[in-house]
Image: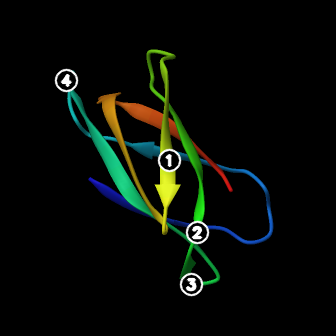
């Protein structure tokens, strides 16, 4: 699914969400905005319920992280 994440002046943002992919693996993709504008660059770290951590790159606000297992995940945005 797609997720829209926005944050203010904080350097890190932790968001817990439900991936809803069952027991399989999927791709988590979305857009990160700051004050309504896409974040030019940065990283997203996705920690799956299994404890596996995956990292994706933010480019022009967009990101995509493949191999995310189903269930609750933690997403940290690092500008």
The residue at the point 34 percent across, 52 percent down is 29
Residue 46: % across, % down: 50, 35
Query: Mark 3 or mark 1, which has the lower sequence index?
Result: 3
Residue carrying label 2: 40
Residue 28: % across, % down: 33, 45
Query: Mark 1 or mark 4, which has the lower sequence index?
Result: 4
Disc 4 and disc 3: Cα gap in Å? 33 Å
Q: Report helix, strand or loop for mark 3.
A: loop
User: Looking at the picture, does residue 26 appear above or below residue 52?
Assistant: below
Disc 3 and disc 1: Cα gap in Å? 19 Å
Q: Report helix, strand or loop for mark 2.
A: loop
Left or right of 37 on screen, residue 11: right
Of the pair 6 and 38, the residue shown nearer to us? 38
User: Looking at the picture, does residue 12 appear above or below residue 27?
Assistant: below
Badge 2: how crowded within 10 Å, few (<14), some, or many (20+)? some
Query: Mark 4 or mark 3, which has the lower sequence index?
Result: 4
Q: Quadrant of residue 40?
A: bottom right
- CB under 8 Å between callouts 2 and 4? no
Query: Mark 2 or mark 4, which has the lower sequence index?
Result: 4
Badge 3: how crowded within 10 Å, few (<14), some, or many (20+)? few
Give the mark toward the camera: 3 or 1.
1
Of the pair 51 and 71, the residue shown nearer to us? 51
Which label was assigned to residue 57?
1
Residue carrying label 4: 24
Residue 11: % across, % down: 78, 56
Which label was assigned to residue 36?
3
The residue at the point 51 percent across, 55 percent down is 58
Left or right of 72 on screen, residue 11: right
Give the mark toward the camera: 3 or 2.
2
Q: Report helix, strand or loop for mark 1.
A: strand
Give the mark toward the camera: 1 or 4.
1
């Amino acid at each position: 699914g797609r997720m829209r994440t926005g944050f203010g002046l904080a350097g890190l943002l932790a968001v817990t969400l439900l991936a809803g992919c069952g027991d399989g693996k999927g791709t988590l993709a979305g857009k990160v905005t700051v004050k309504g504008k896409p974040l030019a660059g940065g990283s997203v770290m996705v920690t799956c319920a299994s404890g596996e951590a995956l990292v994706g790159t933010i480019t022009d606000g967009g990101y995509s992280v493949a191999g995310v297992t189903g269930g609750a995940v933690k997403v940290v945005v690092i500008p």
